[in-house]
Image: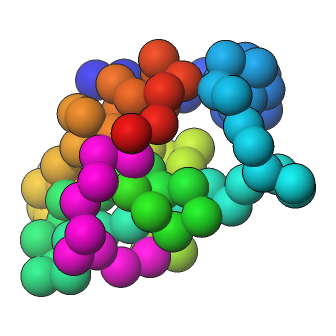
Amino acid sequence: MWKIVDFKKWKKECFKKIPWNFKKEPDISIHENISGNYFYHIAINDIPLCGEKNTMRRELRLASWGIKSSHIGERYCKKCEELWIKGGII
Ligand SMILES: [Zn+2]
């Protein structure tokens, strides 16, 4: 499981790698598939990195990405995670 230890530092590092063209700091959030299946994505300005379209914004902190509770069975999008780590956007 991928765990974020120091979210602020991690975010800063990612920002350096990503060729941002935003005028202000982008809005980063966690999205879940519209069907409510606990499948989560990382979204920038409400667009999931992997390109998934049928998602909705959830009030979850990015710092909780990758953490699984035993009863819900959350899944975290590998593609979003890879792209986020690489600092790329499709
Ligand atoms: Zn995704």
Judge left or right: residue 45 versus residue 27.
left
Q: Quadrant of the C terminus?
A: top left
* Residue 69 visible in rendering: no
Please give the name of the residue rendered at 44% of the width and 75% of the height, measured from the top-left corner.
58
Q: Quadrant of residue 77?
A: top left
Please give the name of the residue rendered at 28% of the width and 23% of the height, measured from the top-left corner.
1
Q: Is residue 34 magenta?
A: no
Q: How many numbered discs sit on the rendered protein?
A: 0
Please give the name of the residue rendered at 75% of the width and 43% of the height, measured from the top-left corner.
21
Q: How far across and how far down the image is residue 61, in percent?
A: 57, 57
Q: How is the image coloured?
A: rainbow
* Residue 71 visible in rendering: yes
Q: Quadrant of residue 28?
A: bottom right
Judge left or right: residue 25 versus residue 71.
right
**Closest to the observer, 49 or 81:** 49
Looking at this rendering, what residue extends furthest in the front direction?
21
Main secondary structure type of the part rendered in magenta: loop
Q: How far across and how far down the image is residue 62, in percent?
A: 55, 49
Vertical position of residue 41 compared to residue 34: above or below: above
Q: How far across and how far down the image is residue 7, in percent?
A: 68, 32
Looking at this rendering, what residue extends furthest in the right direction?
24
Q: Is residue 52 magenta?
A: yes
Judge left or right: residue 28 versus residue 40.
right
Q: Quadrant of residue 37?
A: bottom left
Vertical position of residue 33 compared to residue 1: above or below: below
Part of the protein shown in magenta: 49-57
